[in-house]
Image (cartoon, rainbow, N blue to C red):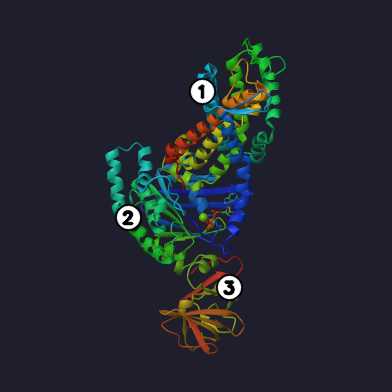
Amino acid sequence: MQRRVIFDNKLLPYLLLAPQVAVTLVFFIWPAAQAIWQSVHIQDAFGLRSEFVWFENFTAIFTDPNYVGTLRTTAIFSVSVTALSLSVSLLLASLADSKIKGAAVYKTLLIWPYALAPAVAAVLWMFIFNPEIGSLGRLLNGWGYNWDYRLNGDQALTMVILAASWKQVSYNFIFFLAGLQAIPRSVLEAASIDGAGPVRRFWSITFPLLSPTTFFLLVVDMVYAFCETFGTIHALTHGGPGKATETLIFRVYQDGVVNNDLGGSSAQSVLLMVILIVLTTIQFRFVERKVHYS
Amino acid sequence: MATVEIKNVRKSYGPVEAIKGIDIAVQDGEFLVLLGPSGCGKSTLLRMVAGLESITGGQVVIGGRVVNDLDPKDRDIAMVFQNYALYPHMSVFDNMAYGLKIRGVPKPEIETRVAKAAEILELGRFLTRRPSQLSGGQRQRVAMGRAIVREPAAFLFDEPLSNLDAKLRTQMRIEIKRLQDRLGITSLYVTHDQVEAMTLADRILVMNHGVAEQIGTPLEVYQRPASLFVAGFIGSPPMNVLDGVIDASGQGVVMPGGALLPLPRPRPDDANRPVKLGIRPEHLTISDGLAASPILVELVEALGADTVVYGRLPDGESLLIRMAGLPSCTEGDQLSVAPQPGALHLFDAAHGRRLAD
Ligand SMILES: Nc1ncnc2c1ncn2[C@@H]1O[C@H](COP(=O)(O)OP(=O)(O)OP(=O)(O)O)[C@@H](O)[C@H]1O
Ligand SMILES: [Mg+2]
């Protein structure tokens, strides 16, 4: 239900909104506008002059044979990270929601990864997966599996997917747990009296009632996978070996900061923005319809 | 349809004993009401029958089968919850059809059964609506419908009417009674509302602190309460309880004010025994004579059909009197009241159990 608040003072509502608007302007609209402006310019090597070039930067992207590979990597990476972190966190939250001993400790432990900086998390994963010093890396090689993510692109991609998903699991977990706890126990009890076993109960009652949370996390996780995984990839693989773990966001950094191609990099970030807008719109148009809001 | 036997059933939550050994055999088609104050363990007992709560000791037998270790779904029962517990994301039809679908009932039969239940409960117009689009009373009906389409061996109700307003509650109460008469399904019904208990029950199990204080028909429970607790819990306004002493001859009981009330039968063995004396407010009448006590009227409540008088005995004990019709006295009046013959309840002064009549 919507409530209307009536302000006596005409200015007050705008004042209350001002901080939010200011933050959005300074940290979102302004950089986005800058990116769009730069995406249609080319700068010289020293950043002194820039020249308006219409859509040359975009044409360059689309004619670059590597760009398709980056798109493909991004798609695999994002879908995997979103799916993996959603499913694992839902599983963990369901377990935490049932009556278990030490539930409080378990919940706290699960929330910790969220507090770790990407670089720290990456070091941690390195200690696990490094073929020479990593515990799991050595184990795999000991079993005769040739594990070295520094040489094998698929292994590298698997590893960054794992690391990036792991970091998002905590976040999803908190929301899923809150969502699960909001489902009245008696509704599930009614279902079990109606004859539904645990699996059926989950898919026919819990999952649909959790759909607003799942949908919200789907959008958030996708944006995370596209945009916020730069730190993890950078620290773990640097986009390598070759371009095996180079996602769109990583390439934006690579071209802009390392290769000093600000125009090209900006064009890519504008593209990334468009892709995200399209995907989110699709989600809101087609997935949200299936969501049950109580 | 089936019998439900509860055999010395116990429930502990850690060191806390919530149910301390309850025995009752509910007959096929019988309507048993579990009545008691908040926290006495009514829901716990019902949920143990449903299989939602583990059984610490004793046995629950439904239709001749020990169900202690069976899941709720295998017990062939249906339950109506206090908050209805409807599936919020499903239509009214799907709410009622859910249990049937799971049990693999063929689609045409599901449709006829739901349609029949909807007709009985006057839900036909709402079948495509979500629970959130229904009023409290309609939701209640859907919860009932979900229970009856299953045609279970027993119905379990946990305070199904307590979220409704007074008028709707009366109406639904009558409907539940009618429905149960018509379907003849064994029912266990939890409530703390004595009117519901009196009107719905074939038998009432009065519970207190996890034990059964009395099991009996509504009239038995009203006319011959087995303990002071039952005496105080059933009846409104509650029974007057006074300290008395059986006189030396065992012919009567001496009231605090000195009045001598004749006993229905002489109790020579109980001579000089201190007792608790129970008199229902509706069994006191204005009269003179030996058995009468003088009271000072402190408050008069006119309820329309009858009147409740709050009086005080000379020794300071208060006494409630319920009289038919409009008030015939006002505050400050002196009245002389006496119990109707045979309307005395005697309880042991120490443990509160009823003395043998
Ligand atoms: N999970 C639990 N852990 C510990 N004690 C519990 C638990 N559930 C119930 N109890 C206790 O068991 C007793 C009986 O509870 P129950 O819910 O059966 O009461 P009730 O008669 O249904 O009361 P109400 O009329 O308020 O619903 C209460 O004293 C309650 O505190
Ligand atoms: Mg209860």
Q: Amino acid at mark 1?
A: Thr
Q: Nearer the viewer, residue B263 or A267?
A: A267
Per the image, the residue denoted by label 3 is: B275
User: Is the residue at mark 1 in contact range of ligand 1, meaning its CB lies under 8 Å from it?
Assistant: no
Residue A59 numbered tag: 1
Between the C-alphas of marks 3 and 2, the distance is 51 Å
Real-space CA distance between mark 2 and mark 1, rounded to the nearest whole angstrom: 68 Å
Q: Secondary structure at mark 2?
A: loop
Disc 2 is attached to a residue of which chain?
A: B
User: In this orientation, which residue lies closer to the viewer: B158 or B20?
Assistant: B158
Residue B66 at least partly seen: no
In front: label 3 or label 2:
2
Q: Name the residue tied to disc 2.
A: B121
In the displayed structure, would residue B254 be above or below residue A176? below
Q: Position of residue B313 (x, y in %)?
A: 58, 83
Up-down relation of residue B212 to residue A166 (above or below): below
Q: Are marks 3 and 2 on the same chain?
A: yes
For residue A155, the mark is: none
Q: Amino acid at mark 3?
A: Val
Q: Contact (CB < 8 A) between labels 3 and 2? A: no
For marks 3 and 2 on the same chain, the one whose residue lies earlier in the sequence: 2
The answer to whether residue B311 is left or right of residue B307 is right
- Output the chain of dot 3: B
Secondary element type, mark 3: strand
Q: Position of residue A66 (x, y in %)?
A: 54, 17
B303 and A74: which is toward the camera: A74
| Marks 1 and 3, how far apart at CA | 103 Å
Q: Quadrant of residue B137?
A: bottom left
Report how many numbered discs are placed on residues in the image: 3
Residues at circles 2 and 1 in contact by the CB criterion of under 8 Å: no
